[in-house]
Structures are given as structure tokens and as C-alpha cells.
Image: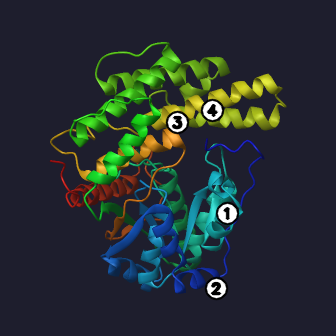
Amino acid sequence: MTVILDRPYQFIPPNRNDLWPAFIQKFRIFDYYLRKKEGVVSYDCRNIERLKQSIASGAGVLLAPNHCRYADPLVLGWCSRHSGRHVYAMASWHLFNNGWFDAFAINRMGGFSIFREGSDRQALETAIEILVEAHRALILFPEGTTNRTNDALKPLLEGVTFIARTASRRRHKKDGGKTVVHPVAIKYLSVDKIDDWANAQLSQIESQLGWQKPVSLPLLGRTLRVVEALLALREVEYFGKSRTGPLPARRDELIEHLLSSTEQRMKLENAVSDANESNVRARVRVIRSEVHTRWFSRNPNDQEKRALRGDLAAADLAQELFSYPDNYLQEETVTDMRLVETIQRMQETLFGKADSSIPLHAVIEVDESINVPAEKAPRGVEDPILTSIRESLTALLENLSGEARPVA
């Protein structure tokens, strides 16, 4: 669960001492962490000169990367190394609650917290201030959360352009300086062929499901077989029986059931309507926010706490199911890394942690800068800056997806 119920939210500001990130870079500490914890053993920074030019111009620089793995913020440390400029990064509050070492390391490397389940003015003001100061670049992930679908970009959050435009106005008023956004595409590639690793991981999942009969399916068919089995288990859990039909339709039906039943129990129909009923992420956010509010403001008894934990689990499952995009494992376009991502996502569901023993190569590609005007965004339409970020990331990722191995 990403909502922390052990203690109420408290903003964690970034550590502004440059000695810590310099120390971490000098001794390649995050390189070691990426190898050991995430399996990222090598990298390639492309078009880094574009970022260097923006830094040299004195602009406030916002890096807007896609977000498909937990490794992404650390991988961008290589961008920082080659550009010669340290970075700050906005990080979800729950990441600061995964142990004292992680909290310490994230903060010393420039991370500061954001409360995703509610309004967090301190985090927004800190991000704006960083861009106005232009002392370091700022990393904001427009997708908001990680999704393990490297080739599919999730809907982007408007908060990124709100921060950028507000900073641009303040910077222009302060000294006439400018603010720019660099879309950054991160693509992970398997160093070796995945067959041995993938078959071993699928065997582990199949064993967990109680399957004993060996299978002679190709790797794609075997993966899809496990995906359907896990969906069927969830259907039995929430519907009482498994269903039939195409997997995307069954997924959507389960998502709707999870969200609507939770909204009804919590009497959130009106709040959800205001948050846009068609947006799964918005509905999940409303549920999470309400769970947090009731937990810390209404002194619930043990029975209600159990119910709230169930509501939170349902919302988390809905978001997890939403992260399985249509046609991602389509036979004509499936790649080895799409299979790796799917297997690792299933492992996180079953075991709470994905196997990271498969060595990965990270490609980090910086796109041209997008100038942020000082004017407010036009009303009634999507912010043109957000459109530009989406188009840039989509094009970069589409191109990079071709570097993965096709599945025979």
C-alpha cells in the first residue's frame, strides 16, 4: 500500500548541501545500488549536450521523464553526472517510509516529499522555488507513479505545467530569466537473452499457484497463461467466480467493481463525480485521500480500521490492474522487455518484490528544451506545454522500443 497509516504526513524538505550528492557521485554509490538492487548494470546518456546548453544559459531546468521503474530517479543520476549539475527530485511520501537508510539516501541526494493523496502546498512551493533559484535541475515525473510499462506512457498530471509556469512568472519578474522543460525518455534493455530467466521466474509463479504439470508453451503463451490465472483468482476473490471473455474487458469490469463498491461503502459518489468518474487514477486518489482523512481525523475503531484497509487494498488493486495496457503483449509487437516487465509486475503482486537478477542496460535520451512562457495556461484546453511533453516522450519511447529484442 502506498498510503502510510502509521503516522500522518509531514513534509520532508530537500537537503541543499552539495557535498552529499558530490560524495555520492564521486564514489559511484548509486551505481552500486542500481546493480545490486535493480539489476541496472550499464547505461547510455544520449543528447546530454541539450541539457548542458540549458544549464549554461542560466535557465531554471525541469526534467520531465517517463516513469516505468523504481530505478528511474537513480538512473537520472547519470544525467546529473554527465551534465555537471546536481538535481532535486520530488518523491512520494511513502518512499521515505521504507526504512531509515532509504529515507536518508533519498533526502541527501536531493529528494523531497510530496503527499499524493491530498494538497501539499509546501512541496509545490519548494519545487517552484528550486526552478526560480536555478541552482540545480528539478526532476518531476509527469505520470506521477511508476507503471512497469516502458513502452506505454500513462496520462500526464497537470501539476507539472502548473509548477513550471508559476516558476517562469516568478523568475521573469525576479531577473528576466527563463524556465525550460526537457522531456527525458528512459528505456531499459536486457543485456542478455531473457529465456532462461523468464522460464525460471514463471516456474516459480506457477509453483505458487499450485501448478505441477510442466508446460510446453512458448514464452509468450506461458506468460499470458499466468496473467489470465492471476486475473481469474482476483475475480474469484471479488466476484465469487472467474469470468470469461477478452482479458481487457474482464480487467475493466473488475476495476469498475473495485472502485464503485468502495465508493458506495465510503459514500463518495459526489466526491468522485467532481474528480471525473472516467478517470481511474482520479477515483483511486479520492479513495486514498478519504482513507487517510478518516484514519487520522475520525479516530476509527478496530472494525472500521479493518474496513479502511480493505478499501485501500481495493483502490491499490484497481490502480495495479489499470497498469496492464491493452495489446502490450500482442504477438506482432511484443518484445523481450515487455515480457520481463509483465513477469516482474506479477511477482510484485504475489511476492511483494520483483526478481532483479536479470542484467539491464538503461538508455537515457534528453530531448530539446521546451520554453515555458510566463503567461498562465489557456483555459478550457490542455496546457500546450503538457501536450508538447506528451508528444515528445511518446515519440522518443516509440523509437527506443525498437531497440528491444522481438519475441520470436
Write down the residue under mark 3: 282
Q: Judge left or right: residue 369 versus residue 329.
A: right
Look at the numbered discs 3 and 1 and tell me whether their residues touch, using CB distance below 8 Å: no
Q: Earlier in the sequence, mark 4 or mark 1?
A: 1
**Residue toward you, 381 or 282:** 282
- Tell me the amino acid under the disc marked 3: Ala
Q: Can residue 133 be seen here?
A: yes
Measured from the top left, where is residue 150 in percent x and y? Answer: 34, 52
- Tell me the amino acid under the disc marked 4: Leu
- Tell me the amino acid under the disc marked 2: Leu
Q: How crowded is mark 4: few (under 14 residues within 10 Å), some or many (20 or more)?
A: many
Q: Earlier in the sequence, mark 3 or mark 1?
A: 1
Measured from the top left, where is residue 82 in percent x and y? Answer: 41, 82
Q: Distance between the residues labelled 4 and 1?
A: 23 Å
Label 1: state its secondary structure.
helix
Residue at the location (64% across, 69% down)? 105
Write down the residue under mark 2: 19
Write down the residue under mark 1: 103
In the picture as drawn, the residue positioned furthest to the top comes out as 240
Write down the residue under mark 4: 312
Label 3: state its secondary structure.
helix
Q: Distance between the residues labelled 3 and 4?
A: 14 Å
